[in-house]
Image: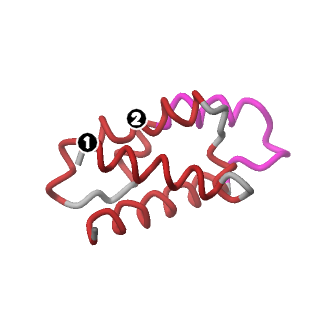
Amino acid sequence: MKMLVMIVAGMIGFVAAFSFTASDEIGAEVDRRLDEDFVPQCVARARFPAELEAKAPAICGCMKREFDNRGFKLTDAFGAKQAEMQEITQACAQVYG
């Protein structure tokens, strides 16, 4: 459970870091790049515990697929969809952890 809390906290930090660059005035190009770079950036910034580092690409890929399936953007994590996005993050960590 402690590891899961660490993963969720890391992912919230990851989403927060992206939210500052994806503001409305930057435009659609940034949204496209954030979407394309999600998995590599997630792996680089999520701060997974050592025992999960090897599984980071799979966990991040799982999150990306689920976010896409539900039509979420990274910036949605700071709105009404925050709880649902956290549930997705936790579920992916449990599946691959």
Query: Which residue corresponds to the image point at 59% horizontal and 51% vertical from the top-left?
Result: 84
Residue at far right of view = 25
* Element under disc 2: helix
* Between 57 and 88, the one nearer to me in the picture: 88
Where residue 49 sits, quadrant-wise, is: bottom left
**Residue 24 x/y as whole percent:** 83, 46
* Between 21 and 7, the one nearer to me in the picture: 7
Dot 1 amino acid type: Tyr
* Left-right relation of 15 to 81: left
Looking at the picture, does residue 74 appear above or below residue 86?
above
**Count of marks overlaid on the render:** 2
Assess whether residue 67 is covered by the magenta stretch.
no
* Left-right relation of 39 to 18: left
* Element under disc 1: helix
Label 2 sits on residue: 62
Does label 1 or label 2 sit earlier along the sequence?
Answer: 2
* Left-right relation of 12 to 7: right
Range drawn in magenta: 21-38
The numbered mark at residue 86 is: none
**Residue 69 x/y as whole percent:** 58, 27
Where residue 19 sits, quadrant-wise, is: bottom right
Label 1 sits on residue: 96
Q: CA distance from mark 1 to mark 2?
A: 9 Å
Residue at far bottom of view = 2
Query: Which residue corresponds to the image point at 30% horizontal and 35% vertical from the top-left?
Result: 58
